[in-house]
Image (cartoon, rainbow, N blue to C red):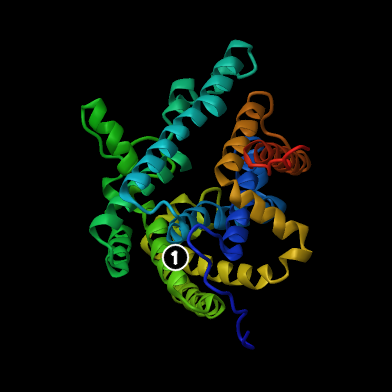
């Protein structure tokens, strides 16, 4: 150990780094906060001081952190082949639509049938069919894993991934929403750059986050002293934050996106992506420092546990919120905080149950 950084030896392939797990656990908790505020709470709450205090951290640390760490974690995975990546990505892509069915289409259909959803207030994007075709995080993650597996086969040098990530940021936003008269072509265009209000994570330019994460993870896996690496990348991240902030806040439109209800536009601009990459590097550096004391912190161990079961956690929390939506809407600040705690607590119980069911238990000794 040095005075500047906590030294961490390189983990064998397939093992995990606590800093990445803690950071991803934070992103999962932030997702619950954002989903409850978006889906259950009165939109006016987000314009209050308390609403902003809850909403802003969630928006800053949710999807970008999740996707960056997804890319970084590939360097520590045993499943590094193209075939494994294609299969894993395709399964995740299909799981996204299965989740849409369970947390969106079915509850909305039943809510309409039972009279719980006022039809006069529904938007076209709220219909059961539209909710099924929603492009959310799992669809994006599956497609990203497929593309990263192919990229890993034909462009193995990190400099190529970095160039690709930088080029993606400058994808012309004017193309977003462009469609054809062909339904099949439009389906793929929707995945590529988004042609409907129900596409939250189009590949362009969101693919930049897992690509930057892949570069980060490659050099992290190669670093002999992980503590020094975390410290140096956090320092570089801080420089990115300082350098990008003045550019971002010169644009009044971006200022509005930062401080109003949505941050999606901010997160998908070239300097917005770089700003978030800097923020993520700083966050992971902080998580590394915290990880030294995680044995004494039930909260940090809980974040690691959620990260180890990231897909289960994500699906359970969305399913709970999707069914709550048909019975609850426009709730107040206090009720919103209560339901955030309820969703996190219930999701944690479900993840614990899943862990018990799927974790191999040692066999009893012979004759026992």
Q: Nearer the viewer, residue 321 or 250?
A: 321
Q: Where's the C terminus, which quadrant?
A: top right
Residue 22, by quadrant, is: bottom right
Q: Nearer the viewer, residue 23 or 34?
A: 23
Query: Would residue 303 appear left or right of 166 to someone viewing this image?
Result: right
| As drawn, 5 above or below 359 | below
Query: Would residue 16 appear left or right of 134 to someone viewing this image?
Result: right
| As drawn, 237 above or below 347 | below
Q: Where in the figure is residue 52, as x and y percent of width and height? A: 65, 53
Query: Would residue 206 appear left or right of 6 to someone viewing this image?
Result: left
Who's the residue at 53% across and 67% down the image?
Answer: 11
Label 1 crowd bin: few (<14), some (14–19), many (20+), radius 10 Å:
many
Q: How many marks?
A: 1
Query: Would residue 45 appear left or right of 206 to someone viewing this image?
Result: right
Q: Where's the N terminus, which quadrant?
A: bottom right
Query: Does residue 171 appear anywhere in the picture?
Result: no
Who's the residue at 59% across and 40% down the image?
Answer: 312
Who's the residue at 60% across and 52% down the image?
Answer: 307
Q: Where in the figure is residue 18, as x and y percent of width and height? A: 61, 63
Who's the residue at 71% across and 35% down the image?
Answer: 331
| As drawn, 217 above or below 145 | below
Q: Residue furthest left?
A: 181
Residue 200, by quadrant, is: top left
Q: Residue furthest bottom?
A: 3
Q: Nearer the viewer, residue 220 or 178?
A: 220
Q: Which residue position is annotated with label 1? A: 217
Q: Where in the figure is residue 358, as x and y percent of width and height? A: 62, 38
Q: Secondary structure at mark 1?
A: helix
Q: Nearer the viewer, residue 215 or 34?
A: 215
Q: Where in the figure is residue 189, as x and y percent of width and height? A: 28, 38
Query: Does residue 25 appear anywhere in the picture?
Result: yes
């Amino acid at each position: 150990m040095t005075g500047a950084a906590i030294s961490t030896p390189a983990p064998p392939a397939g093992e995990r780094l606590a800093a990445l797990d803690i950071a991803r656990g934070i992103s999962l908790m932030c997702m619950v906060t954002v989903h409850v505020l978006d889906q259950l709470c009165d939109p006016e709450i987000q314009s209050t001081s308390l609403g902003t205090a809850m909403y802003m951290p969630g928006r800053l640390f949710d999807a970008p952190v999740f996707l960056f760490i997804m890319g970084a974690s590939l360097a520590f995975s045993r499943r590094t082949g193209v075939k494994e990546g294609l299969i894993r990505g395709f399964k995740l892509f299909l799981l996204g639509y299965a989740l849409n069915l369970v947390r969106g289409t079915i509850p909305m259909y039943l809510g309409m049938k039972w009279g719980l959803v006022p039809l006069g207030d529904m938007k076209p994007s709220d219909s059961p069919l539209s909710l099924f075709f929603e492009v959310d995080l799992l669809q994006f993650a599956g497609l990203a894993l497929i593309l990263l597996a192919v990229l890993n086969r034909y462009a193995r040098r990190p400099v190529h991934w970095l160039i690709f990530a930088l080029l993606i940021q400058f994808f012309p936003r004017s193309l977003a929403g462009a469609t054809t008269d062909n339904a099949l072509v439009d389906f793929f265009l929707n995945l590529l750059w988004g042609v409907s209000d129900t596409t939250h994570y189009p590949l362009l330019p969101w693919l930049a986050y897992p690509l930057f994460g892949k570069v980060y993870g490659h050099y992290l896996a190669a670093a002999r002293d992980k503590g020094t690496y975390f410290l140096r990348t956090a320092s570089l991240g801080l420089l990115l934050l300082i350098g990008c902030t003045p550019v971002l806040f010169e644009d009044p439109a971006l200022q509005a996106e930062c401080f109003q209800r949505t941050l999606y536009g901010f997160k998908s601009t070239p300097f917005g992506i770089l700003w978030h990459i800097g923020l993520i590097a700083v966050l992971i550096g902080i998580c590394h420092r915290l990880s030294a004391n995680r044995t004494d912190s039930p909260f940090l161990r809980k974040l690691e546990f959620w990260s180890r079961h990231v897909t289960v956690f994500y699906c359970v929390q969305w399913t709970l919120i999707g069914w709550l939506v048909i019975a609850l809407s426009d709730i107040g600040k206090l009720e919103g905080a209560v339901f955030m705690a309820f969703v996190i607590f219930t999701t944690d119980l479900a993840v614990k149950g899943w862990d018990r069911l799927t974790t191999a238990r040692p066999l009893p000794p012979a004759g026992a």
